[in-house]
Amino acid sequence: MTGPFELHGGTFEGLLSPPSLPECEESNPVESAVIRGLVRSWPRRATVRRVEPELDDFFDPAKADFPEALLPFREHDLYRCLDESKKDRLRAWGWIAYNKNVMDIEQFVVNPGFQLLSRDAFGTGLGDGHRAAALQSMVDEEYHTLMHLNASAATRRHRGWPLREDALPAAQTVRRHHAAVARHTDPRAAALTTLAYTTVAETSISAYLGLMTGDEAVQPLNRATVALHRRDEQCHSSITGDLVTLVYDTLDADDRHTLLEGLREGVDAFTASDLTTWRAILDQERVTGAGTIIADVTADGDRKPMVQDCSAIRRLCERLGVAEDIRDGW
């Protein structure tokens, strides 16, 4: 397969660029130019409202399912000595795990926060437009989950390998989110923690999705799935930032502290390295020396986290005037 391929009347390359957003000069509980513009444009811009492309048409069996550069053990001798068929299966597993991570975050981290906003759970006084934006975003996230499920199913179908998600653990962000919420006995504090994790995910997931769009050696079907998802998330970041700002402005000191602690923990959860899933994959594939590989990679202090771009959440914290309060460790 050569050259750009058509999606929704445009080229794949065009999907890699973020959509233009309406300009906003003010934000208040009554009216927001960003929210108004995005709510009105949703029927035209949202992936769920468009004709679904036949992504199977883009499957190229000669392309890798996952970027080699994202394998944490790619330089390890025990991986490098594997035959190519085993490496192909591990890369396919990488794509399945990537999709599961996205689906887990959308279902168990992002949408619970949007649900809170859609019913104005914090008594902010959000208007119909703000609540509609939250509900539209929830619809988008459900569709993104379906998109990634379908992409994994296509990989299993074309490769002829089972590669079942239920063999893998829950995403680290989900585990950390659940633990953070469980520490609170006060329902409001638990809800604010959920909102914080939702905010981190929605302002940072575009960087995570961007990891899959730049390598032309990677399966076109997979790159197309991620690119379509990423276009929606460019808008969600703006929506989330606007709504969280409105909520924050109405909180008292204790609630603000809870929200900021959640943001700090959320950033750490979203960006921290976690090899639990890769250990499960290596065990599934009965890779010789799996424990040694994971131990060696874990001990490598120079290994950088997969997601390093937290600029969007930093900008939001600057907007809230709290950047210095939660900067440590970023």
Image (spheres, rainbow, N blue to C red):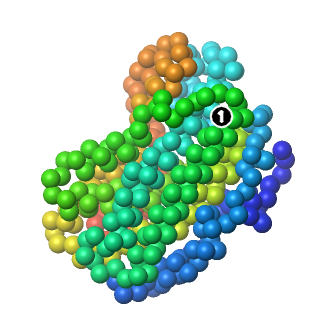
Q: Nearer the viewer, residue 240 or 216?
A: 240
Q: Which residue is mark 1?
A: 156
Residue at 19% in and 66% down = 255
Residue at 67% in and 48% down = 223
Left or right position of 95 against 112? right
Left or right position of 14 against 226? right
Amino acid at dot 1:
Arg
Q: Is residue 278 above or below residue 244?
A: above
Q: Position of residue 86 (x, y in %)?
A: 64, 20
- Kindly give the residue lying farthest to the top in the view shown: 288
Asked if residue 310 shows in the view, the reply is no
For mark 1, give the secondary structure.
helix
Q: Position of residue 310 (x, y in %)?
A: 43, 55
Asked if residue 251 shows in the view, the reply is yes
Residue at 45% in and 60% down = 203
Q: Position of residue 18 (x, y in %)?
A: 61, 65
Q: Position of residue 76 (x, y in %)?
A: 54, 21
Q: Is residue 174 above or below residue 111?
A: above
